[in-house]
Image (tube, rainbow, N blue to C red):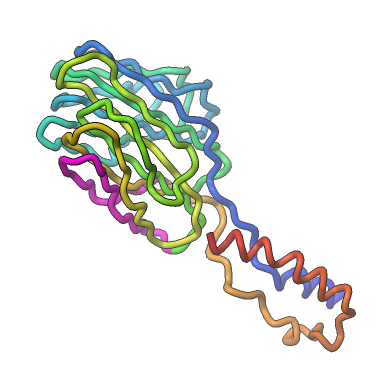
Amino acid sequence: MKRLIALLFCFPAFAAFPTVNGTQGSQTSTAGTSHTIQLGATPTTGDMLIVIASFGLDAGALTWPSGFGTWTQLTNTVNTSHHQVIVYKSANGEGTSISVTSTNSARMASIAIRIAASSYTGNPEAGTPATGNSTAPNPPAATPSWGTQDVTWLAIAGQRSQNAVTTYPTNYTSNNLTQASGGSGAAVSSTYLASRNLNGSTANPGTYALAGSGGAWVANTVAVQGTGGAPPATPKRLTTLGIGAANRPPSLNRWLRAWLEPVRAQASR
């Protein structure tokens, strides 16, 4: 029995990345100061809600609803003719949409992300916003304060255009979504999202490739911490626990290799 208990404690913990329950795009196709942002399905209390809103002009000051708790602003960046805001909160009775007002009239393109309540720890963190004018928005590196953890990394971009994505950042193959504001003329906007799960302390997603002509853009990388931790490179040596290779039957050795390989592969992604 002592050896069995020791065997159980020699293995690394399973990876525990955040669970994205859904994403939802919204648009304000006619320039105005009232904007409805769809959240998708009704959030469960405690879900993490993250909203990225992109405007085709400087929208000025934004007022977020306060009836179900405070929305916290991660970033608020204006790059000449493009304005991007990222906010978050823990769900607490919201329905399937919220209303936001801006002091300046503008078109809007937004994406809302819902992360399951039991699958994340703490609050999301972001890098320093990057800006440019091209068809290659480049989300910056992000190094959250918590160190090496199981993290869902969100590669975010917005542009004063309605250009389609031709290539998402390398390895960011989950939750790929483009939302355009609709409408016509110069003051339009799009928001772009892609994500990946990776155990690490920092991430630099790389660039988007957009079709069409260039335009002012803002990009960022947001990190959401999971409930797992930093796995060891290898488990404790079983020999130090009195159950070394000499004391293990071949069938147990085969079982250990089969059990550890997917854990190590997942941790190295």
Q: Which residues are magenta?
A: 123-147
Q: Vertical placement of 132 versus 91: above or below?
A: below
Residue 10 in view (yes/no):
yes
Which residue appears farthest toward the left when viewing the image? 80
Q: Quadrant of residue 80?
A: top left
Is 116 colored magenta in this rendering? Answer: no
Q: Residue at x 37, y 30 (%)?
A: 178
Q: Position of residue 41 (x, y in %)?
A: 53, 21
Q: Position of residue 204 (x, y in %)?
A: 34, 56
Q: Vertical placement of 93 versus 32: above or below?
A: below
**In the displayed structure image, the side of residue 156 where residue 34 appears, left or right:** left
Q: Nearer the viewer, residue 69 or 170?
A: 170
Q: Residue at x 69, y 66 (%)?
A: 261
Q: Position of residue 141 (x, y in %)?
A: 31, 56
**In the displayed structure image, the side of residue 238 where residue 86 appears, left or right:** left
Q: Quadrant of residue 102?
A: top left
